[in-house]
Each structure stands twice: as C-alpha cells, then as structure tokens.
Image (cartoon, rainbow, N blue to C red):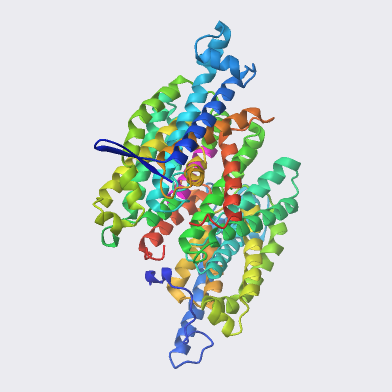
Amino acid sequence: MLSSVRRTPVPRPGGPGGRAGPAAVPRRVLRWGGLGLLAAALLLTAAASLAIGAEHVPPGKVVSGLLSPDDSQSSLIVRELRLPRTLLGLAVGVALGLAGAVMQALTRNPLAEPGILGVNGGAALAVVAVMSAFRVDEVLVYVWAAFAGAAGAAALVYLVGARGRGGASPARLVLAGAAVNAVFTALTAGLMLLSPRTFNGFRFWQVGSLGGRGMDVLPRVLPFIAAGTVLALLLARPLNALGLGEDAGRALGARPGRTRALGAVAVVLLCGSATAAAGPIAFLGLAVPFIVRAAVGPDQRWVLPYSLLLAPVLLLGADIAGRVVAPGELETGIVTAFLGAPLFMLMVRRGRTRDL
Amino acid sequence: MSRTLRAGGLSLRFEPRSALVCGVLALVAAGAAVLVVGSGEFPIPASDVVRALLGQGDRATEFIVTTLRLPRAVTGLLAGLALGLSGAVFQSMSRNPLGSPDLIGFTTGSATGALLQILVFGGGAVAITVSSVAGAVLTALAVYLVAYRPGGGGVHGVRLVLIGVGAAAMLEALNSYLITRAELREAYEAAFWLTGSLNGRGWEQAVPLSIALAVLVPAALALGRPLAMGELGDDAAQALGVPVQRTRALLVVVGVGLVAAATAAVGPVPFVALAAPQLARRLTRRAGARLLPAALTGAALLACADLISLHLPVAVPAGVVTGVLGGAYLAWLLSTRKGTT
C-alpha cells in the first residue's frame, strides 16, 4: 500500500455510495467499523492523556476529579492542567490532520503539509509580530493575526511553487515551502531577539506544545476550527472530482476554481487557529493522511473523516510520549518532528524520482 | 560572448563580461568591508580606514582597524565567499536553485553541533568550530546515505534535496529543544548565534576560516568542469567521461566543508548560499554553475548585509538582514517569469 504515495486520489467505483457490485457492501461496513474503532481509540487516548503525567494520579482520582471536583491536588491537576491540555490536543489535532488532508488533495501532492509548506511558520511569524509590536494579550487578536499569516504564507508558497512549466510538482512545492519558511524563521528570530525579555516570552511559544497554554485560548479558537472542519468535510466530493485532474473534473461538472478557493479558506482557518492555540506543530498533517490513504484508499469521503479521528489520537499520543520520555517533558512539536521527519524521508525515498 | 586566447600550445577561454562582473563584485565586496571597518561607536572615514590598512594611519586608528574591526570584516567576506561557492556547488548538483545548503539541513546540522557545544559542553571557540564542522559532516553523511538507493541510480539530486529538507526540520526541532532547556542568558546568546551574526568576531574565527578556505576553494574550482558537465544530466555527463557518482561524492565533501567552515565562524546565515549563485548567473548572463562569480557575489552579499545591520537603529544580527533580503529576492523571482526551477 505504500506505493500509493505517488498516486493521485481517484475515487474507486466500488467505494461507498457506489453500487458497483456485491463487494461494495462489506467494504462499506468494514470502513464504518474502522471509523468506530478509531473513535474508541480516540476516547482511550484522551483518557490516557488525563491519567498520565509527571505527577501520578490514580484512575479513580481522575474520574472523581472530573465528576466531583474538590480542592485536592490530584483533582486540581486533572481539572486545571490535564483537561484543558487534552481538549486543546483534540482540537489542534483535528485541525492539523484535516488541514493536511485538504492540502494534499488540493495540490495533489502527498508531501504537502502545513508545517513543511510554511503555513504554520507564517502564522507563527504573524503572531510573534503582533504580540511584540502591540504587546497585546488578547487571544482573538493573535488568532486573526495567525489567519493573516497563514493565508499570506499559503498564497506565497503556492505562487512560488506553482510557477513555470509543469505547475506545482511535489518537489517544487516542498522546496518553495522550505524557502518561504526560512524567510519566516529569520524574521521571527529577528523579532524575538530585539530584547532578552521578548526572547524569553517566545522561546517556549515558538516550539509547538499543548502544555502551558492559557485556559482562554481554546474557547476563542474553537469556533474557527469548527467552521474549518465543516467546510473541509463538505468539500469531500468536490475534492474527489479535483483528484481526477482539471479537465476531467470540469467535464464532470466540478468547479475547480471554487473548490480550490474554499479548500484554501478551510486550510487557513484550520492551520491559523491550530498555530495560534499551540504554536507551530509540523508533520502531523503529513503523517495522518498518508496513513489513512494506505488504509482506506484515495476517496476523500473516507480520507477526511478518518484523518479527523486519527490526527488527535496521534497528537495526544505524541504529547503523552513527550511527558513520559524525558524528565521535564518534551514539547509536543519536537516529538512530532522527530516521528514525522523520518516518515517524510521514507516517502521521498520510496517515491519515483522521475516525478520528483 | 567568449573569446579564446591562444599562445603556442596553450589556449584559454576568456569571457569579458564575466571578468568585468567579477571585478565589480570584488570591488563592491571590498568597499562594503572597508565601510564595515569604519562603522561602529567610533566612526572612521573610509579614507582613514584604507590608510590604516596600508600601515600609514595613526596609532589609535590602526589599533581600532586592525585589531578590533578588521577580523569582523574579513570573517564576513570569507564566510560569504564560502557560502556562495557551496551554494553554487549544491544548486548545480541538484539542478535546482532551491537546493542550497541552507534549505537542506547542512547548515542546520552545523548549527546543532555548535549549539551542543555552546549549551551542553561549554567549549571554547575551537571546540565550537570542531563540533560545528562535525555536525555538518554527520548531517551530510546521513542525508547522503538516506538518499542513496542502489537500484534507483545512486544519489539523485532532487531526492538528496528533499531528504535534506526533512533532516533540516528534524534538526530545527532539536535546536529549539536545546534553546528551551538552556538558561535565559545562554539561550539568548545561542539564539543570536543561530540567526547568523558577525558581532564580536575576532581573529580566532577569521584565521581558521581562511585556512579552511585555502584548501577548499581551489578544490571546488578544480571540480568546476565536471560539475558543469553534470548539469547536462547524469547519462550525458557519463558519456563525456565524467565519473558521475565519484565526482558527486567529492563535490559533496567540498561543499559541506565550505558550509561547515562558514557556519562555524558566523552561524547559520540564511539565504546567502541560495541567492548568490542565482544573482551571479543573472549578472554574468551565463547558464550553469559559475563558481567564481557566485563566490564573489556571496562575499559582497554578506559584507553588505553586515553593513546594513550595523547601521540599523535596532541591534539586528546580519542573518536577519540576509533573511529579509532573501525574501525580497524570492518575491523578485516571483515577479519575473524567467526564474523557474
């Protein structure tokens, strides 16, 4: 199934909804079953995220901390630290996984990813710029800044990568993203280095992490993530048509221009709010659709919901691993980079170089 | 436009435009370096700088120029030279203007080595140089090994670059980890260094860098011809008698050496390696890898960036200036239809 890396998403006739033959029904049942299993895995991971950490809290205390809050230390840890962190992980995971899936479908490029393509970097730069220029702590202000940064970065990368003969090949888009990301990194560093005080404020922020974010962040970004999620899920069919290629899609009545525009809006909403909430986290958007496509094939009507459920499982898993692996916690963004980058390299290695 | 000079059995191809461009670039680089020496808390006019460099200035000026400020200017020139040259080598090998060492992890690996030394082991300037070189070499080795596929025609240029992008992302995460774990003052210094800066560079950086370049620059220039042939494609180059894989390995060694030497001295300055060869190509209007013009462009770029950073109202490291200039360069690449990959 790994050979599906280079394959453009083409819906199979025997897929869900298609009444191509007797085999269609069992596969559909299987996929719904898989979705159920993933949902169960998500619940388990969320429970683990509440229970595991530097301070040992027995399972009974976790439950009582949630249901009948008192002033004991374990109850406080569960309610004040782990619950917000877990909820944030769920929201950010959904956002990044879906953003990755939509980006890969839009660009028809399995290497497209909000971290590598600099979209998260653009959002982070905008947040740092707004925070250091206006000294505002109002979450909503830097959520909007993150949207502006993400949109600017996405537009810039696509313009750089898609120019010239042959349009945006996978390699060119990645390289354009790396170049644009390097600009953002330099500018972010320049802003951070203006004084040791600003530097101290941002050196933790610019490593993506679920821990240590304020309680007020999640409620502010949640409406945007919800909007982006709904938009992305509604785009499943048009994205399938886009996967057939420009001309074939148009012949089937698809409107590629509108699909691209709406898809870009979804990506910007999701990446912008995820970065505003947790800082830049890379590679989740790469790994999730990759694994999902290997399991359910290229049909976006399955890829998107599976990505939506798998991404928070992986993100919370990475977060838990970061809490356990190193003394004093490893930031989530570092764990995802260390797990995701080797996968990226493997995909490049397996890809046929003719296309690269 | 090229002319051939013949004298008996010897013949030399001579390109007037390239020679002119190289001359102008060298002048720009030297001029910027002189102005860098003249800038600071105690400004010195350019004429006095030149007089002091020739040994005809007064004592105080001479002390400020040769002991305090000259090493910074020299380090900037040499590091820019090395970055421009290595950028030309890697871009030509990957046949892609974006395949420069600052995007594909070699610079980041070099920075990781130095950061480990600064923050964890607490070594001095020499130790930082050594571990910075080790970081670049290990990264390059790892990238090269992962990109190598026996059945897939050895190391393919673009695959090498993409693997490098992945490695860079991983190493950047490691660098952030190191920065967040360190004490604020140390971390601030390390972050300054990570951006690429010429502040406080002395002869202890300039001398090892010039020794390294004395070996690496002639080696790179000697490999210029097989490098240019490699741009025709692996098969064509093979047919012309170039041992493709061996040449590529040698070029990687030289290119990585150049990056490592430069990074050890000034930190991972972004975009000089990316932009210099491209600018040089447009200035000389010659296709392909022009190593000498690229090297001189790199030197001019870094010297000018340092000059700008010295005259900005806020203390900004030279790496931020090159980062912003790199962004402008990318935008320019966008606005012209020619600069396609």
Front residue of B312/B62: it is B62
Q: Is residue B238 above or below residue B141?
A: below
Report the side of A165 relative to A269 (left or right). left
Q: Residue at x 71, y 64 (%)?
A: A223
Front residue of B188/B151: it is B151
Give the mark count: 0
**Quadrant (top left, top right, bottom left, bottom right) of the C terminus of chain A:** bottom left
Q: Is residue B188 visible?
A: no
Q: Quadrant of residue A271?
A: bottom right
Q: Is residue A33 visible?
A: yes
Q: Residue at x 76, y 42 (%)?
A: A134
Q: Is residue A332 above or below residue A107?
A: above
Q: Is residue A225 above or below residue A303?
A: above
Q: Residue at x 46, y 42 (%)?
A: B108
Q: Is residue B1 above or below residue B9?
A: below
From which residue to which does the magenta span run?
A: B167-183
Front residue of A230/A65: it is A230
**Quadrant (top left, top right, bottom left, bottom right) of the N terminus of chain A:** bottom left
In reply to whether residue B169 is colored magenta, the answer given is yes
Question: Could you tell me what secondary structure mostly forms the magenta stretch?
Answer: helix
Q: How far across and how far down the image is residue A103, in percent?
A: 56, 66
In reply to whether residue B34 is colored magenta, the answer given is no
Report the side of A259 relative to A34 (left or right). right
Q: Residue at x 64, y 61 (%)?
A: A268
Front residue of A58/A340: it is A340
Q: How far across and how far down the image is residue A221, in percent?
A: 69, 59
Q: How far across and how far down the image is residue B81, in percent?
A: 45, 34
Q: Quadrant of residue B36?
A: top right
